[in-house]
Amino acid sequence: MCGIKFMPAVRFIWLCLIIILGSCAAPEVEKKPVNTVWPLPPAEPKIKFIEEISSKEDVEEITKSEFLKGLIAGPRDVNNRLVRPYGIAIDKDGRLYVTDIGRVFVFDKRNKSLLFVGDKPDAGQLKMPICVAISPDGRIYVSDAVYGKVFIYKSDGKFLGEIGRADELKGPAGIAIDPVRERIYVVNTKKNSVMAYTVDGRFLFSIGGHPEDKYKLSLPTNIAVDSEGNIYVVDTGNFRVHIFNSDGKLSRTIEGGKKGSFIRPKGIAVDSEGNIYVVDAAAQKFFVFDKEGNFSLSVGKGGIEPGQFSVPAGITVDDEDRIYVADQMNGRIQIFQCLSKKWQSAQQSQKQTNGQ
């Protein structure tokens, strides 16, 4: 009984303390400036930090009453917050899909909402989702390392079916979709190969895993496909990236340059100019290579500030050359802008529209 009567008073006192402390001027603390462009001046910047997303509050508008209610209730709802994000995808409407523990977050800034996929206790419930990809018609593909399947959902999250016959996939991770050829590629990590399917799940061919192969994949993790159908596979165990043509034939390999050597490569993506982005989970940064595989620059270091990472993983690039990186242990997605020719052209058009 005493506890029930006392609780409102505790909350009232706590709220008063917040208001009082908030009105007090905090002592000035000298902070070192955070690097938000790469490379640093006087070099011409190529990439800049934009923002980060970690919870429902980053996409939904919070009213004054909701804010006050949150103060009284205490800590923010952890059920709507990223914990260990890994895989990332962007659909044509700008929705951000992020795999996390037991579900996929769908951040929709345009409609100011947060939805979930694969979290319901029925068919299609995820256990250990790793990566996610979105087809042009909005279907959602999610690899699950425990079930050894790729689950398929409609754009509204309704379960449609799965890819992967019995014992065909072991520890599936990266997924990439080739919209032109209507294929989906799945990294079959524990079988050291990549499986190619039609988007409805019919097996086509595999890359790697054959004794006669001149190259040997070792625990491959992530994958990307460019506009020409070239396939980029992160060969994590061998600290390199292989690039195959659309027929699965090896065309070249990126070992990493003197300043771009890999320690534990994970996520990979390609932008509109053919630049290749490779996340290194151990180096706490992502590397940028030109379309020929030559090292260009690196972004990031260990830490919690913008442009700093703690075991980063997945990466993707949208149609506007914005770069999204899953910052795993910091529980967030960091978003950067590649200052590409496409971006510069868009900026110039915007200035002309605004009469500047």
Image: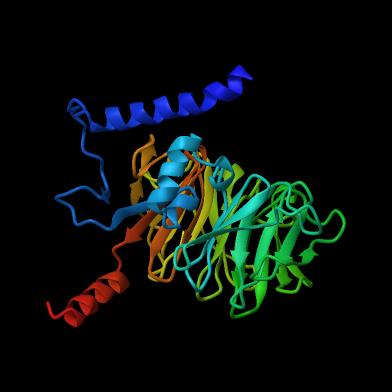
Say how many tags the image has.
0
Which of the 4 quarters of the picture holds residue 231? Answer: bottom right
Q: Residue at x 17, y 28 (%)?
A: 28
* Camera-side residue of 305 and 114: 114
* Camera-side residue of 242 and 152: 152
41 horizontally vs 300: left or right: left
Where is residue 52? Give x, y as percent.
Answer: 40, 50
Q: Which scheme is used to colour this image of the protein?
A: rainbow
User: In the rendered view, would you say 76 is above or below 269?
Assistant: above
Outermost residue on the right side: it is 166
Q: Is residue 116 visible?
A: yes
The N terminus lies in which quarter of the figure?
Answer: top right
210 horizontally vs 40: left or right: right
Which of the 4 quarters of the picture holds residue 160? Answer: bottom right
Where is residue 147? Give x, y as percent.
Answer: 79, 50
Q: Residue at x 51, y 56 (%)?
A: 268
Outermost residue on the top side: it is 2
User: In the rendered view, would you say 310 is above or below 220?
Assistant: above
Q: Residue at x 66, y 56 (%)?
A: 214
Where is residue 186? Give x, y as percent.
Answer: 68, 60
User: In the rendered view, would you say 290 is above or below 344?
Assistant: above
* Camera-side residue of 104 and 185: 104
Where is residue 307? Give x, y as percent.
Answer: 35, 44
Which of the 4 quarters of the picture holds residue 4? Answer: top right
Q: Residue at x 54, y 42 (%)?
A: 77
* Camera-side residue of 161 and 14: 14
